[in-house]
């Protein structure tokens, strides 16, 4: 690995976090408001303007960010300061790290050099992302513990219990797909889907299970028990200013990661049906690989945005689960179903071969 | 002798389709998706029925006909204030936001009239007791004015001329008496 390869990886990671993750997270703040407003026959936030231009309220995320950055960062007397400060960073860092392992595109030939569009090319990418997502719960528990407040601690406990309940199913529902693909690498999984068929066709149950468990993992509304932002305040009760904002962004970030993983493993990643992008990326014709790279990125981003739209719609449709219902769902329904799905997949492959 | 009849209401049963929840989720999603796309279509065509939102400062606030809004002091036909300074409203006011000083009226039929009459809208609870108590129908709460906020507590006090509409209440006029 040369120095330039390392530089390219740094550029890719930076682009994945700053261009892909942060921009979509900011956009989600707008989508959240507008989509909920329109489906509830309202208008939604439309007042923030720059020189009188409101642009459908698109400036509200910017106003939000400015507000978060300039607000007082209040710390109660009872907080444990270093833990209190590091907790949102851990929660958000875990989400950001996952973004860097997603396959945004395949490999393209340009100027006599093969450029991979996946920031971190890791042969065990899938468990890496799952492990990093599970790390996020440390931030939540730490936040609740360091708050020195019973509300925060109870929220953190709810968060930890929910996280384990969803995380187990998250991993086990992927077992069948990964067994089918025969790889733990995101890029290989996408290429398998290109060579055969998209994962959602062969593993529809795993898709639904993963989507449900993923929604539970992101701590958003049908499963927002750790936060319960409308009445029971959760683990971030003692947080204000940008530290609170980081928890807010973490939720969006985890949604993006979940949608990215679903895209890569079930919806064919950067593939476009009827177009052999992998071959176009290796084409000797000048600039064709560049077009292929742009199409790969666009395809992946489009699929992620479509899934986010669906998750947002689910978030504004369903009422919140009760806590025992959530744990029942995780342990008694999702987990056995995902294990059954795995067994069925294994038997199916055995009989097929 | 009355016959007691009992109507047994069946608890709604959950079917298997409800228990697995996915069908119900899909039904709910169908409703919200329908609202979303129908409303988006209406927004695109700039139809007024795309949303029920009243954009208040631009569009006027729609108040019910019986809504209690800001107080208004009424006048007699000859233009004199109806108020006879009986202090009933000041007495019944639970928020103690009405201040009246009385003086002798030149009109012998009413004996007294208000020299000053002020209402502190910052303290008013909009209960409407003053309207109920008034024996001469001098005070109403139907000015249809809800934009009464000001930048200081002092500016929330409305004097007699302002309550009667003789003088406009300026955003920061400090002529409380």
Image (tube, rainbow, N blue to C red):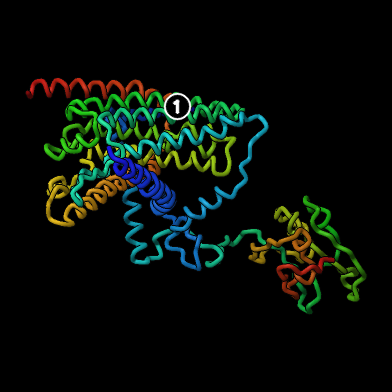
Drawn side of residue B119 relative to residue A232, left or right: right
Drawn side of residue A338 relative to residue B64, left or right: left
Q: Residue B22: in sight, yes or no? A: yes
The quarter of the image holding the C terminus of chain A is: top left
Q: To which quarter of the image does residue A80 belong?
A: top right
Drawn side of residue A313 relative to residue B167, left or right: left
Q: Which residue is mark 1?
A: A323
Residue A241 at x, y percent in the picture: 57, 44
Q: Residue B10: in sight, yes or no? A: no
* Along the viewing direction, whichever of A130 and A29 lies nearer the viewer: A130
What residue is rendered at 56% in x and 63% in y? B61
Q: Chain of mark 1?
A: A
Residue B41 at x, y percent in the picture: 32, 60
* Along the viewing direction, whichever of A272 and A186 lies nearer the viewer: A186
What residue is rendered at 19% in x and 25% in y? A179
What residue is rendered at 61% in x and 59% in y? B66
Residue A261 at x, y percent in the picture: 29, 37
């Amino acid at each position: 690995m040369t120095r330039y390869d390392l530089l390219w990886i740094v550029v890719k990671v930076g682009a994945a976090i700053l261009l892909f993750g942060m921009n979509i997270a900011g956009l989600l703040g707008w989508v959240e408001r507008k989509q909920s407003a329109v489906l509830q026959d309202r208008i939604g936030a439309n007042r923030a303007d720059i020189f009188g231009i409101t642009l459908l309220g698109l400036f509200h995320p910017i106003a939000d960010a400015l507000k978060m950055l300039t607000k007082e960062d209040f710390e109660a007397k009872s907080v444990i300061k270093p833990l209190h400060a590091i907790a949102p960073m851990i929660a958000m860092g875990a989400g950001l790290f996952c973004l860097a392992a997603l396959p945004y595109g395949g490999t393209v030939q340009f100027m006599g050099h093969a450029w991979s569009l996946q920031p971190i090319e890791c042969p065990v990418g899938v468990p890496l992302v799952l492990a990093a997502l599970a790390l996020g719960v440390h931030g939540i528990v730490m936040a609740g513990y360091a708050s020195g407040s019973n509300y925060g601690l109870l929220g953190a406990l709810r968060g930890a219990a929910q996280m384990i309940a969803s995380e187990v199913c998250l991993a086990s529902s992927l077992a069948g797909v990964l067994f089918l693909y025969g790889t733990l690498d995101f890029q290989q999984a996408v290429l398998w889907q290109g060579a055969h068929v998209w994962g959602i066709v062969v593993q529809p149950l795993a898709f639904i299970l993963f989507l449900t468990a993923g929604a539970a993992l992101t701590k958003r509304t049908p499963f927002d028990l750790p936060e319960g932002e409308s009445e029971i305040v959760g683990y971030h009760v003692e947080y204000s200013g940008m530290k609170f904002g980081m928890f807010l962004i973490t939720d969006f970030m985890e949604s993006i990661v979940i949608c990215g993983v679903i895209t890569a493993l079930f919806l064919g990643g950067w593939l476009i049906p009827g177009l052999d992008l992998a071959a176009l990326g290796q084409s000797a014709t000048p600039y064709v690989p560049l077009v292929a790279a742009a199409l790969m990125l666009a395809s992946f981003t489009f699929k992620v945005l479509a899934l986010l739209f669906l998750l947002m719609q689910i978030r504004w449709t369903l009422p919140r689960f009760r806590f025992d219902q959530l744990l029942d769902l995780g342990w008694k329904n999702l987990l056995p179903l995902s294990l059954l799905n795995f067994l069925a997949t294994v038997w199916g492959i055995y009989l097929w071969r | 002798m009355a016959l007691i009849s009992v109507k047994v209401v069946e608890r709604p049963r959950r079917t298997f389709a409800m228990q697995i929840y996915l069908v119900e989720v899909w039904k709910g999603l169908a409703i919200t998706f329908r609202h979303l796309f129908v409303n988006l279509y209406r927004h695109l065509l700039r139809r007024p029925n795309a949303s029920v939102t009243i954009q208040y400062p631009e569009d006027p606030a729609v108040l019910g006909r019986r809504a209690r809004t800001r107080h208004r002091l009424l006048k007699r036909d000859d233009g004199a204030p109806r108020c006879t300074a009986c202090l009933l409203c000041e007495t019944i006011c639970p928020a103690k936001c009405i201040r009246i000083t009385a003086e002798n009226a030149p009109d012998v039929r009413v004996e007294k009239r208000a020299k000053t009459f002020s209402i502190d809208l910052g303290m008013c609870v909009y209960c409407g007791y003053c309207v109920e108590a008034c024996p001469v129908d001098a005070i109403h709460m139907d000015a249809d004015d809800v934009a009464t906020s000001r930048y200081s507590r002092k500016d929330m006090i409305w004097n007699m001329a302002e309550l009667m509409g003789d003088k406009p209440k300026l955003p920061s006029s400090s002529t409380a008496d």
